[in-house]
Image (cartoon, rainbow, N blue to C red):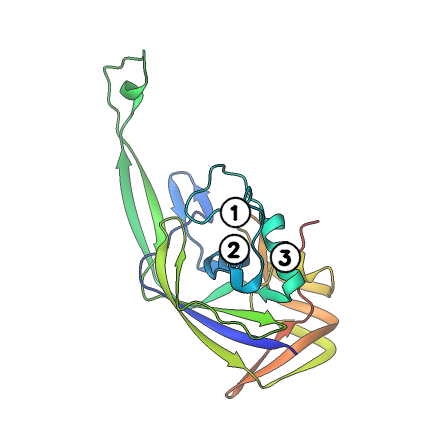
Amino acid sequence: MTHIYRCTIELHDNLYYATREIGRLYETEPILHNYALCYALGLVDSDRYSTRVSEEHEYRYFCPEQIPKYEQHLIPLNQQGIYVTPAKAVRHAAVLHTWKYANNNYHVKMEKTQKNIPSFGRAKEIAAESLFECFVISNQPIVLPKWIRLGKWMSKAEVTVEELNDFTTMTKDFICEHPLNPLDVMFSQQVVSYDTLNMPPVSLIRNVRVMHGSHYRIKSGKDSFSLPANMQYRFS
């Protein structure tokens, strides 16, 4: 049996991560990647879902090496029948911060300098009280955390979960406006057109038009929308 959950994420701190770097400007796009959400929601290393990887790959508070292990961490979610979509901004505001730093050559052993040349950078962050929305599709009932941490500074965010029970599975042409991970969709769907959202580690797509594709048609109040079925984490 399929369970579909709508997760509303409200920021309680400013959110920062570098979606793009334009000279000295580091900009945060108002969208949350589904890889990051899997970690934030505790789905990667939580005993509740039996997705814990080996000790050499596990990290909760400290990462000894800066090498992503998305494939090792997320493939077990396919076995559990759990999938998290990227999150789009329902409402958001941006704030701009300027930071300065000095030349630190005088800290290097055997190197002297008579100059201390300051430099600066600017960070465009997503402001507190901004609201995001994502969906969790699972083959079994799950319990998601109330509070999570996001972004470079581990910003605090509140998660409100609503299970959507009014949906049907059908196979026909459809359009999905919600952002999606193309690696997880194009393997099982015939995608005709889409808009690209450039961001690492995998650029996302939205306004996706699919021909004769299997999808969930979901009703929520007076609104209805479509999400592709059979989405799984893929890395080839």
Q: Is residue 163 above or below residue 120?
A: below
* Residue 216 visible in rendering: yes
Determine the image quadrant of residue 108. top left
Give the structural element (helix, strand or loop) at label 1.
Answer: loop
Q: Position of residue 118 (x, y in %)?
A: 26, 29
Give the structural element (helix, strand or loop) at label 3.
Answer: helix
Amino acid bearing label 1 = Glu
In-front residue for pair 46/133: 46
Residue behind mark 2: 45
Mark 3: few/some/many CA within 10 Å (<14, 14-19, 20+):
some
Q: Position of residue 189 (x, y in %)?
A: 73, 65
Q: Position of residue 168 (x, y in %)?
A: 66, 83
Q: Is residue 110 above or below residue 124?
A: above
Mark 2: few/some/many CA within 10 Å (<14, 14-19, 20+):
many
Please indicate whether residue 181 sits to the left or right of residue 42 in the image: right
In-front residue for pair 1/68: 1
Label 3, label 2: how many angstroms apart (C-alpha)?
A: 10 Å
Which one is earlier in the sequence, the residue at label 1 or at label 3? 1
Amino acid bearing label 3 = Pro
Residue behind mark 3: 76
Q: Is residue 233 above or below residue 60?
A: below
* Residue 177 visible in rendering: no
Q: Are marks 1 and 3 in contact (CB under 8 Å)?
A: no
Which one is earlier in the sequence, the residue at label 3 or at label 2? 2
Q: Residue 58's mark?
A: 1
Please indicate whether residue 109 sits to the left or right of residue 150 in the image: left
Q: Residue 126's mark?
A: none
User: Seen from this angle, which residue lies furthest bottom?
Assistant: 222
Give the structural element (helix, strand or loop) at label 2.
Answer: loop
Amino acid bearing label 2 = Asp
